[in-house]
């Protein structure tokens, strides 16, 4: 593993912990040369998993894209990054368990909204407004009324 600061290859592992509920291993490392510390994550290399977009195009599942969307919805809300990462990890695990090789982006969007609805209602509305592409105030109000029920 290359040091991100001095680019040397020699480092030592200071601490290892299980992360994301056993899905990854978090390692704290220290560079032998510059003595700076950095964190690495090890994950199992997953089988290719494709997302079928609304226009029919297939693209590889991108965990970072999902994480960024949920993080954006939770921006300036009392939701920790730990909770966001847990939500994304659970969702990814569920998708990989239930769908063999492909899943529709519509299913992913609905599952994200279900989880956000439980986590934070404002984040849910934010995500829904982008995902469902609200074009007018009535669509927005209709979603809020459904949330109240």
Image: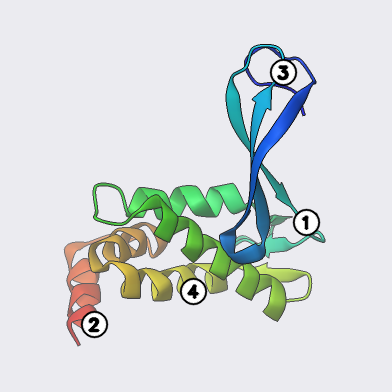
Q: Rate crowding at label 3 as few (under 14), some (14 to 19) or many (20 or more) other CA atoms within 10 Å.
A: some
- Residue drawn at x 46%, y 68% as measured from the top left: 112
Q: Left or right of 34: which side holds 106? A: left
- Residue drawn at x 64%, y 12% as measured from the top left: 34
Q: CA distance from mark 4 to mark 2?
A: 17 Å
Q: CA distance from mark 4 to mark 1?
A: 23 Å
Which label's residue is closer to the chain start, 4 or 2? 4
- Residue drawn at x 62%, y 75% as measured from the top left: 94
The location of residue 85, given as percent across then percent down, is: 49, 56
- Considering every residue shown, the one lying at the far bottom of the view is 149
Q: For mark 1, what is the residue?
A: 44
Q: CA distance from mark 2 to mark 1?
A: 39 Å
Nearer to the camera, 104 or 84: 84
Between marks 4 and 2 in the image, the one whose residue lies nearer the viewer: 4
Q: Rate crowding at label 2 as few (under 14), some (14 to 19) or many (20 or more) other CA atoms within 10 Å.
A: few
Q: Left or right of 69: which side holds 100? A: right
Between marks 4 and 3 in the image, the one whose residue lies nearer the viewer: 3
Residues marked 4 and 1 touching at CB (< 8 Å): no
Between marks 1 and 3 in the image, the one whose residue lies nearer the viewer: 3
Q: Rate crowding at label 4 as few (under 14), some (14 to 19) or many (20 or more) other CA atoms within 10 Å.
A: some
Q: CA distance from mark 4 to mark 3?
A: 44 Å
Which label's residue is closer to the chain start, 4 or 3? 3
Q: For mark 3, what is the residue?
A: 32
Q: For mark 4, what is the residue?
A: 111
Considering the numbered disc 1 on the image, is that residue within a helix, a strand or a loop? loop
Nearer to the camera, 88 or 139: 88
- Residue drawn at x 23%, y 63% as measured from the top left: 122
Residues marked 4 and 3 touching at CB (< 8 Å): no
Q: Is residue 143 above or below residue 61?
A: below
Considering the numbered disc 3 on the image, is that residue within a helix, a strand or a loop? loop
Q: For mark 2, what is the residue?
A: 146
């Amino acid at each position: 593993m290359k040091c991100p600061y001095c680019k040397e290859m020699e480092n030592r592992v200071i601490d290892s912990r299980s992360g994301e509920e056993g899905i990854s291993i978090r390692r704290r490392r220290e560079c032998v040369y510059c003595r700076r510390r950095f964190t690495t994550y090890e994950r199992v290399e997953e089988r290719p998993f494709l997302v079928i977009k609304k226009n029919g195009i297939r693209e590889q599942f991108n965990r970072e894209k999902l994480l960024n969307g949920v993080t954006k919805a939770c921006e300036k809300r009392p939701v920790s990054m730990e909770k966001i990462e847990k939500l994304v990890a659970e969702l990814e695990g569920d998708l990989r368990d239930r769908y063999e090789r492909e899943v529709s982006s519509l299913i992913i969007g609905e599952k994200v909204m279900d989880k956000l609805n439980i986590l934070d209602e404002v984040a849910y509305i934010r995500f829904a407004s982008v995902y469902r592409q609200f074009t007018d105030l009535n669509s927005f109000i209709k979603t809020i009324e459904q949330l109240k029920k």
